Image (cartoon, rainbow, N blue to C red):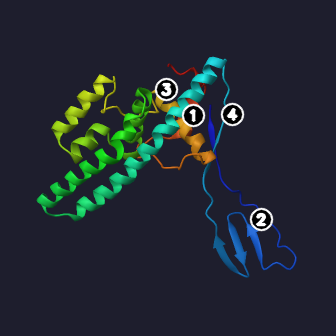
Amino acid sequence: MYNNTCYAQDIPLEKQKDSSYIYYGDYIIFEGDTLVVELDEVHLLKKLKFKNNNDRRYYYWFRQKVHKAYPFAKMAEDKLAIINERLAAIKSKRKRKKYTKRLQEYFEKEFTDQLKKLTRTEGRILIKLIHRQTGATTFDMVKDLRSGWKAFWYQSTAKLFKLSLKSEYHPESVAEDYLIEDILQRAFNDMTLERQESKLDFDFEELSQKYDDFIEIQR
């Protein structure tokens, strides 16, 4: 599979009769004034092809899991940005500790019940996506915001479900992670999920050449 990036071409269009403006590529010229119009980058993704019905069913089943987990990861990034901004403004160690405790209570109240509804597969995807969105593992986030002991406790609990809070997101080397990224890129293009760029350093266009036949991913 591959993806290409499309940009607007600089093709001049003649001025329409009785019109006060003309188009020229990314520009609109009004009576001698130029307005620059920013055009979003668009990834063109190859049409999905499946070898058999089992591959088709697996892909769409897995896509549902990614769509369910992604909003939680996006929320984690949004909340983390706010938390870091506020913590940076708090100079008192005592006040920082008090604020962190309030965050702990908030997250437990706000998200615990929702996260309990996730399946093991959705939980695994979420842990990977949190790393994609924030650049930090779930383990490190818990450790920074609560304490090393709490992070250890959460890690031990996750192991009961055969999950690791230390899991990272590597679409450049892990086939399942690439599948997740491909699903996200398609959802971003379709606007079924709100786009957020990854904090990690990888080039999806280059990866798409490597995983051309991504449906053959190990399950």
Disc nearest the viewer among 3 and 2: 3
Q: Nearer the viewer, residue 82 or 111?
A: 111
Query: Circle 4 sits on which residue?
Result: 47
Badge 3, how many Cα within 10 Å: few under 14, some, many 20+? some
Q: Secondary structure at mark 4?
A: loop
- Residue 130 is left or right of residue 205, and the answer is left
Marks 1 and 3 sit apart, C-alpha to C-alpha, by: 11 Å
Disc nearest the viewer among 1 and 3: 3
- Residue 139 is left or right of residue 73, and the answer is left
Cβ–Cβ under 8 Å for marks 3 and 2:
no
Q: Residue at x 48, y 27 (%)?
A: 176
Q: Earlier in the sequence, mark 4 or mark 2?
A: 2
Numbered badge on residue 12: 2
Tell me the kind of residue under disc 1.
Ser
Disc nearest the viewer among 4 and 2: 4
Q: Residue furthest bottom?
A: 31
Which quarter of the figure is the N terminus placed in? Answer: top right
